[in-house]
Image (spheres, coloured by chain):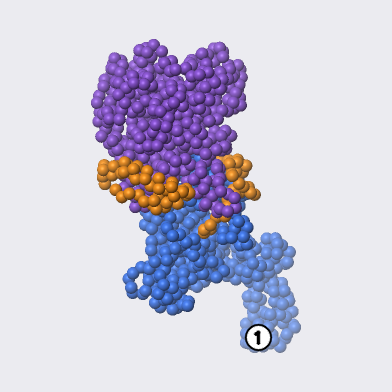
């Protein structure tokens, strides 16, 4: 079944004319038709646009044109990136039906590469959450167990991959929103170094932390996608003005002999599920067998990362979300002649934003207020410096750092929905990476003994050295594949109706 | 019970603060490439960035940084080696992002000054106005209020928003507190804004048209009892759209505040609006709680770290300061203070200078532009250079200096050029206005005049020189004023043996 | 660590332009208390001598040339407008100063 293959395999099939791009696209739409009523990964399907793009690729291939490696490959796009003329909701009511008049740079690059965007995936509203339960359009369900969360905020993208609805996906990661969903769905996700991928067209949640990134079922596919979407963008003042590292070569290299791998002391222990830690340790053994050297490092300021994150991100979002005021786009409530402009704004935002978003806006407004700035936002920005320094010191001693991606496997839908703090703890291992702006990857390292649910292995590389994640990830993936005999998703129960 | 100004200054002293916003004349906006043309059709110069659409990001306009540094240098500021943008968070329909990207505690220019001079009954007085900071920010969109009967907000049914102006670069210039202006506060305020405007014009960084909004002034004022040593509560007055309004707003606020204080009332710290018609100010929106702007460093932009080499290049490229230039020209042309002031007030200094640069005598240039030409211009409600060019005036003056035109003839030439009859040469030709200085020609007229008044001629022969005037007059009349009067006199007297 | 009152939350909601019912305000005030209690620990390590990090990247001076680039057409600009008139965005009565 082609849809269960990697994107690389699909690329071969297309190149060998075993299948056309249009056929491949239709196969994926059929799978979506079959399983998405249960998984609910997608909030919008762009059948017309996708087929049109696929047909164009077929035509160009037939004419002998040299095409990008990923031309004709289907992709699921997280609904936080603007796609011209296509509904972009960010999982919120306040943007219901909004069709942006412009493409995000990531989308422009995908289109130039001939990637076939199937549709927009579900997410926690405005990227705030770790379970996709905060979507205004209903939750997405984990293909491994439909009663469980697929992670968040990018649960739609990771679920689409795990349900074979697409071989590639784009996510965004502010505190772990690519990596944690990858971990709990048995897929691969990367948050590039901050600035590695343009944020132009990425609806901002927390500007100094947000980053779009590639998601797929294999490390190589992820690298291929990384290559397409990364690079300097003059429209984004925070984008890195340097060449994209050769992540594809790194993913293929699969040689970690002599590499120093640091285990972060603070990202383990209390709060981490036993089965998660076991799988993590097994993966470490594999790396040792491959010739890597393990180093123990301590990053004491990581204890403060979660607290700092839940000050910085809400503060920036309280400002970023101010533009949702009913005037130029989006929802408008209360414009019936009895309310003035300000009241309409207040009513619109009351109706259009969900609880988590409101919570964070209020928290952020408080943290920035006169009299509180120094104690809260100001202090959090200092903690950021300390975390950066911890990473720098650790990277003096090792090439990459590793940890479990998330403290637990996928929990049940509804289990943590009413306990914000418990929900926030899902990001405890991923947040330090965003705070320092370095790169982070999650790839599957097994199924936890307690519940047979996927466990994610996180690899962290120094800023501007993303290739190291792919080097270690590629090697580990190959070793684990050899150990398991088949890809991890082959262990997942088959979804009803799935091809 | 309202006091008059004299009463106010007897008891109170004003403390001023002036905030001026300058719209830069860059081709594109501060953070995006949209055009900045004035008067374009609504929402034709917008994009995701200046509309504040979700996902849009700002990129700084290099020219705007350059213009701001030029302004800072011209105002004797230090240029910060490191400065940052910050978000000023508040909601208003004309603000697409509901925050303004501005600068907060790390502005690009700080600690400058501007020397300002005013004319008073007690002679010219100088004031050194200290500049706190000069920083970069962005303009808002424009709202049109529909319904109601005044086109103003109160009573309007709804509003229409045009974002063409949103994102145009603004530079904010803030003075430090200005003490010790006493009764001259209104004039000092006006003179400061006028001087600032001159500098900005000279730098060519803005159109600086107050009527069009490319130069805006907010006036901060507080009063304290003379000798009390305590500062009073200040008010901020906005909507001050002309130099005259600046002066009137200061006066008006001083009177208002003093009148209140006299009645034992407190001054509320508030924002007020200047009303053109009455010269009064009215309260702005009353806010029970002050707006908390929650400033924080703009995460979408990186710091501005101008190279010292670049700053030095800009410093060298600064044009001569208007005040320095005026002093230089005054000395070069030997112009008395009052006449210098008249030229500056009439905004004809540049015109006169250009005329002089084309070779004209400075005194003549001044007298023609400010005299005859201004008179005609005022009658017609136009500006002198709308009527006649610098080149033509210079040519006419040259002809006068050469003796080919008398002042009287020159006036006719000016009229002719203004009437569109052509260049000065054209007019002279068409109207036959050249001075007659050909001796033989003149002799004919002289002899005719003598023949017509033999008694007068006799008197001149007899030594009565003044009597020659009548004869000269006759010759002038006979030649239609085109005779060179001095030449006629010379020839006549010689002919009559004097 | 002072508890955050409902009035304070109401003020924050006003600053953030989000209408809230009394019940919502009460609920949020409680949640704020808990969250602020957890995040306040940043003060423990945020010493005076520690500089703040506002940008992960150590980059300065990103600028663009002063060139005009085509704008959106008015219909594109207004495409998302809930209400418009005469090629402008229409909003109900704005109270307050011009």
Horizontal and vertical percent for residue A282?
Answer: 30, 18
Secondary structure of the residue carrying tag 1 is helix
Q: Is residue A429 above or below residue B415?
A: above
Chain B tint as drawn? blue
Supply the letter of whichever chain is orange: C
Image quadrant containing the C terminus of chain B: bottom right
- In the image, taking residue C40 as reference, residue A339 lies left or right, namely right
Work out whether residue B488 or residue B143 is closer to the camera in this orientation and state it.
B143
Q: Which residue is denoted by mark 1 in the rendering?
A: B467
Q: Look at the image and tell me whether residue A167 can be seen.
A: no
Q: Nearer the viewer, residue B254 or A164?
A: A164
Instruction: Please name the color used to draw chain A.
Output: purple
Question: Horizontal and vertical percent for residue B358?
Answer: 57, 60
Image x and y of residue B236, in percent: 45, 63
B368 lies left or right of A1 = right
Q: Is residue A128 visible?
A: yes
Splitting the image into 4 quarters, where does residue A356 fall? Answer: top left
Image position of A223 with respect to B456: above or below: above
């Amino acid at each position: 079944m082609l849809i269960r293959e990697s994107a690389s395999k699909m690329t071969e099939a297309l190149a060998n004319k075993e299948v056309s791009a249009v056929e491949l696209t239709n196969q994926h739409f059929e799978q979506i038709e079959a399983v998405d009523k249960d998984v609910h990964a997608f909030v919008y399907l762009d059948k017309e646009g996708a087929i049109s793009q696929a047909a164009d690729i077929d035509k160009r291939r037939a004419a002998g044109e040299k095409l990008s490696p990923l031309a004709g490959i289907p992709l699921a796009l997280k609904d936080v990136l603007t796609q011209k003329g296509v509904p972009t909701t960010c999982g919120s009511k306040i943007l219901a039906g909004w069709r942006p008049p412009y493409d995000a740079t990531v989308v422009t690059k995908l289109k130039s590469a001939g990637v076939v965007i199937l549709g927009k995936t579900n997410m926690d509203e405005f990227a705030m959450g770790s379970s996709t339960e905060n979507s205004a359009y209903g939750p997405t369900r984990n293909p491994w167990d439909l009663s469980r969360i697929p992670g968040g905020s990018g649960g739609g993208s990771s679920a689409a991959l795990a349900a074979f609805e697409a071989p590639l996906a784009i996510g965004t990661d502010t505190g772990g929103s690519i990596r944690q969903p990858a971990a709990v769905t048995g897929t691969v996700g990367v948050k590039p170094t901050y600035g590695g991928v343009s944020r132009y067209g990425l609806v901002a949640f927390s500007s100094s932390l947000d980053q779009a990134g590639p998601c797929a079922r294999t490390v190589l596919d992820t690298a291929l996608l990384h290559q397409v979407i990364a690079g300097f963008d003059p429209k984004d003042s925070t984008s890195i003005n340097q060449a994209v590292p050769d992540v594809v070569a790194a993913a293929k290299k699969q040689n970690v002999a002599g590499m120093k791998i640091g285990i972060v002391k603070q990202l383990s222990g209390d709060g981490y599920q036993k089965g998660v830690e076991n799988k993590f340790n097994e993966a470490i053994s594999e790396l040792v067998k491959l010739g890597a050297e393990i180093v123990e490092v301590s990053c004491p300021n990581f204890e403060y990362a979660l607290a700092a994150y839940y000050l910085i991100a809400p503060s920036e979002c309280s400002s970023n979300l101010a533009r949702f005021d009913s005037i130029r786009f989006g929802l408008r409530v209360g414009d019936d002649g009895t309310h003035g402009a300000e009241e309409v704004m207040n009513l619109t935002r009351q109706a259009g934003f969900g609880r988590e978003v409101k919570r964070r806006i209020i928290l952020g407004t408080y943290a920035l207020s006169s009299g509180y700035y120094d104690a809260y936002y100001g202090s959090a920005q200092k903690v950021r410096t300390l975390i950066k320094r911890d990473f720098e010191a650790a990277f003096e001693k090792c090439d990459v750092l590793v940890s479990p991606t998330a403290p637990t496997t996928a929990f049940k839908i509804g289990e943590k929905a009413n306990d914000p703090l418990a929900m926030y703890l899902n990001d405890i291992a991923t947040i330090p990476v965003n705070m320092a702006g370095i790169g982070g990857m999650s790839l599957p390292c097994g199924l936890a003994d307690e519940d047979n649910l996927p466990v994610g292995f996180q690899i962290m590389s120094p800023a501007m050295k993303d290739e190291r994640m792919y080097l270690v990830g590629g090697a580990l993936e190959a070793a684990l594949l050899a150990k398991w005999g088949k890809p991890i998703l082959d262990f997942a129960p088959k979804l009803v109706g799935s091809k | 019970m309202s006091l008059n100004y004299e009463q106010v200054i007897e008891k109170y002293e004003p403390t001023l603060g002036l905030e001026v916003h300058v719209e830069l004349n860059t081709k594109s906006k501060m953070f995006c490439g949209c055009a900045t043309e004035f008067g374009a059709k609504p929402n034709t110069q917008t994009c995701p960035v200046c509309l504040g659409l979700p996902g849009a990001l700002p990129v700084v306009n290099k020219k705007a940084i350059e213009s701001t540094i030029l302004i800072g240098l011209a105002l004797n500021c230090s240029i910060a080696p490191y400065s940052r943008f910050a978000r000023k968070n508040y909601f208003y329909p004309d603000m697409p992002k509901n925050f303004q990207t501005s600068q907060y505690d790390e502005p690009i220019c700080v600690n400058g000054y501007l020397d300002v001079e005013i004319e008073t009954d007690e002679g010219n007085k100088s004031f050194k106005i200290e500049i706190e900071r000069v920083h970069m920010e962005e303009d808002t969109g424009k709202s049109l209020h529909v319904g109601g009967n005044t086109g103003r907000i109160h009573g309007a049914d709804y509003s229409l928003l045009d974002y063409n102006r949103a994102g145009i670069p603004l530079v904010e210039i803030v003075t430090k507190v200005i003490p010790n202006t006493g009764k001259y506060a209104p004039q000092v305020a006006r003179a400061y804004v006028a001087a600032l405007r001159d500098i900005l014009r000279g730098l060519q960084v803005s159109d600086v048209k107050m009527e069009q909004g490319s130069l805006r002034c907010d006036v901060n004022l507080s009063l304290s009892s003379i000798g009390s040593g305590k500062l009073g509560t200040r008010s901020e007055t906005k909507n001050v759209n002309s130099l005259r309004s600046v002066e009137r707003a200061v006066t008006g606020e001083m009177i208002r505040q003093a009148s209140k204080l006299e009645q034992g009332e407190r001054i509320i710290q508030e924002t007020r609006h200047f009303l053109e018609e009455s010269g009064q100010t009215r309260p702005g929106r009353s806010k029970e709680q002050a707006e908390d702007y929650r400033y924080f460093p703009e995460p979408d932009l990186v710091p501005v770290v101008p190279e010292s080499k670049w700053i030095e290049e800009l410093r060298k490229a600064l044009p001569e300061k208007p005040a320095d230039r005026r002093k230089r020209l005054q000395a070069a042309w030997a112009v008395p203070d009052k006449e210098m002031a008249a030229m500056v007030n009439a905004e004809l200094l540049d015109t006169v200078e250009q005329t002089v640069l084309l070779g004209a005598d400075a005194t003549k240039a001044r007298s023609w532009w400010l005299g005859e030409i201004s008179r005609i211009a005022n009658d017609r409600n136009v500006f002198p250079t709308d009527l006649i060019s610098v080149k033509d005036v210079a040519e006419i003056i040259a002809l006068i200096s050469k003796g080919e035109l008398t002042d009287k003839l020159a006036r006719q030439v000016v009229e002719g050029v203004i009437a569109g009859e052509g260049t000065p040469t054209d007019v002279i030709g068409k109207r036959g206005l050249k001075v007659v200085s050909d001796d033989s020609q003149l002799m004919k007229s002289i002899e005719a005049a003598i023949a017509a008044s033999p008694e007068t001629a006799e008197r001149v022969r007899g030594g009565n020189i003044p009597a020659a005037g009548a004869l000269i007059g006759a010759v002038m009349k006979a030649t239609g004023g085109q005779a060179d009067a001095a030449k006629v006199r010379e020839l006549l007297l010689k002919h009559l043996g004097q | 660590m002072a508890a955050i009152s409902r009035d304070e939350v109401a003020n924050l909601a006003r600053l953030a332009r989000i209408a809230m019912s009394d019940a919502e305000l009460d609920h949020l005030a409680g949640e704020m208390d808990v969250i602020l209690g957890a995040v306040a620990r940043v003060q423990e390590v945020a010493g005076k001598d520690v500089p703040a990090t506002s940008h992960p990247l150590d980059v300065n001076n990103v600028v663009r040339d002063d060139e005009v680039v085509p704008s959106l057409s008015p219909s594109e600009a207004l495409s998302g407008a809930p209400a418009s008139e005469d090629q402008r965005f229409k909003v109900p009565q704005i109270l307050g100063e011009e």
